Amino acid sequence: MTVQSMNDSPPITTPRKKNPIKALLCDACGQLPHPSKARLTLANVTAMLPIELVVHAAVVNAALPYVLKVLVLTATVLAIWVAEPSVRRALRGWLHAPALRHRRRLHNSAALWRVRTLIDYSNEAQEKLAEAISGVNAEILVCRNHTVAGGMLDELVVSTPDHVTHAELLAAAAGGGGRDVRAWPATALTVADGQTKALALALRVVEDPSELQLAVAELLDAKPVAAPTTDSTSPATSKPACDGTVLKIPSPRHGPLGFSRPRAPFTPAESARAHRLAELAELTELTRKHPVRPRQ
């Protein structure tokens, strides 16, 4: 049996600190972003000015032939050409400071959450919920209220610091009087102009009513599924989900259409929007089959 001495053990290496400048390198060309003209000019002056002052002082005070003076002054161009890249490397952190600050702001940007909770139907309940959520340094960006049985369903888009966890956000909303609190990570598209999106999808349905299912799925960010039914003799289909994650709307061509969104139940307002699109598709179909002739 051989005993490995301590000298044979692998050396302990200290992890090197990551250079933040390398994070700015382009993935395609491997180059750093071009610095601003003002900072680049100051860096060039820093490289040229000391060399120019030293050389000119030496040439003026030295008793050299005219040709030799011209050659020495010309050589300063080569010296600056060699020194300039070194000065830029030394001042690299200062040259790219704006890009580094912008990158830090992106990394420290807030996270977005979509929160749904049931509260009492009163202004005091809303104020209490908003105060509790602000207790974790969260900011409410969008607030939609839906009157439902048992109170008011609040749908919020909340911006939080990165260190705030899902559990902390749920606890804050529950501490503010929220019941059945649920939260999902969101993106910037959550706070986009929903009215413009709805109008664009309505125009899509008018142009082609067969696009109804895809338009509703895009509007509600849901998945098309077989329409639920209450027929007990059909084992292939099940009853509508009681948690509100399944929605059924009528269709003028294909009968009822079903949509599923397990991660977030449909709100009454979303159901109303989907039914209005279905009515628009049906009206378009009837208008095309029985066009209204203008009066003579």
Image (cartoon, grey):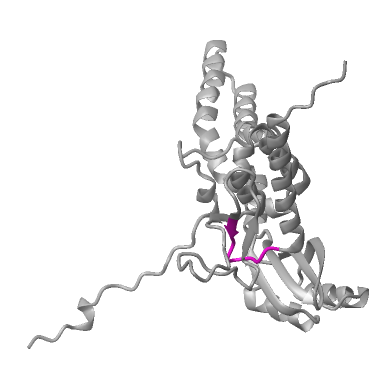
Say which quarter of the image contains residue 222: bottom right
Q: Nearer the viewer, residue 246 or 44?
A: 246
Horizontally, is 159 left or right of 81 in the view?
Answer: right
Please tell me whether residue 115 is drawn above or below residue 21 in the rendered image: below
* Magenta extent: 258-266
Residue 260 drawn in magenta:
yes
Q: Nearer the viewer, residue 30 or 117?
A: 117
Residue drawn at the location 88% of the way across and 15% of the way down: 296
Residue drawn at the location 70% of the way across and 42% of the way down: 282
**Whether residue 203 can be seen here:** no
**Whether residue 198 can be seen here:** yes
Say which quarter of the image contains residue 170: bottom right
Horizontally, is 79 left or right of 150 in the view?
Answer: left
Residue drawn at the location 60% of the way across and 68% of the way down: 240
From the top left corner, tell me how far across and down residue 90 is, in percent: 56, 45
From the top left corner, tell me how far across and down residue 238 is, in percent: 52, 68
